[in-house]
Amino acid sequence: MPRRPQLSNTTIHLTQQVEVMDERGRLSIISIPAERPLTVYVDKRELVTLMTLGGAPEALTLGYLRNQRLVRSVEDIHSIHVDWDVEAVAVRTHGGIANIEERTAKKVVTTGCGQGSVFGSLMDEIENIVLPSDARLRQSTVYKIVDTIRTQQSIYKQAGSVHGCALFSADGEMLYFVEDVGRHNAVDSIAGKMWLDDIAGEDKVFYTTGRLTSEMVIKGAQMGIPFLLSRSGTTQMGHMVADKLGMSLFARCTGKHFLLLTGKERLVLETELVDMLKIA
């Protein structure tokens, strides 16, 4: 188990009630998701401001640093302290981040909602990512995951306007579920949780409610996860990167329907399920 950094344990309201008027002039109260800025400081140097729901800010910060390849090990982090009064998070490292100005200078703005961006060098690093060649996913497990998400209690069901991401085991048991205003924030939060709990991604399945863009595929690959599922679609670059990595990309996952775009050899089709679908 890696040495864990010191973490604050902040809590903050995730929704806000507002008055609305419908098309008949009737007033009612509904809940909307919160959205707030969180400015990340690393060793007293301002790095980035993330727009977030605020449900898991410590994990979000750690996952962001991990997925931007600014920190190589969770043991490099001394502490992460969130202060919502000033809407900031202070990260202290043990030895600093080498060449941080140079490494954060080049950015690629992505299509991810909520100010998604990746530092440009990450596009080059996918050449060095190798996903496990023997990972397999059963058709029934895909259906189990989709059904678990369908019945999951969530901010989305209460207030809408957020994205959700989840990590599952190879047999479809949900390990983490995180919602945020941007899907890239949710995936970073799960990456942070995986790091803190020393969980490898080689036999895991990642689910997102959002599009499978190149950013999402790259982050999933960095976490070592061979399977990405989405109820939405993918982009051309997301498809290209997944195909290059041999990652299984499942899109339009609803009910018993899905589209497997890449990594088709990883799916284990089950005869009885396929026959049932032919009859239906």
Image (spheres, rainbow, N blue to C red):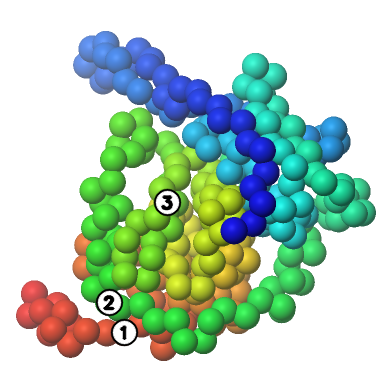
How many marks can you see?
Answer: 3
Indicate the position of residue 216 as horizontal and vertical percent values.
56, 60
Q: Do the CB atoms of the residues marked 1 and 2 lie less than 8 Å apart?
A: yes
| Label annotation for residue 139 | 2
| Label annotation for residue 95 | none
| Mark 3 element type | strand
Indicate the position of residue 274 as horizontal and vertical percent values.
18, 83
> Toward which corner of the image does residue 24 lie, by quadrant?
top left
Mark 1 neighbour density, 10 Å: few (under 14) some (14–19) many (20 or more): few
Query: What distance separates the C-alpha of mark 1 from that of mark 2?
Result: 6 Å
Considering only order in the chain, which callout, 3 or 2, is on the residue closer to the N terminus?
A: 2
Considering only order in the chain, which callout, 2 or 1, is on the residue closer to the N terminus?
A: 2
User: Which quadrant holds the N terminus?
Assistant: bottom right
Vertical side of 114 occupied by 137: above or below: below
What residue sits 73% from the left and 68% below the top? 123
Residue mark closest to the camera, 2 vs 3: 3
What residue sits 64% from the left and 56% below the top? 2
Who is closer to the viewer here, 107 or 85?
A: 85
- The residue under label 1 is 268
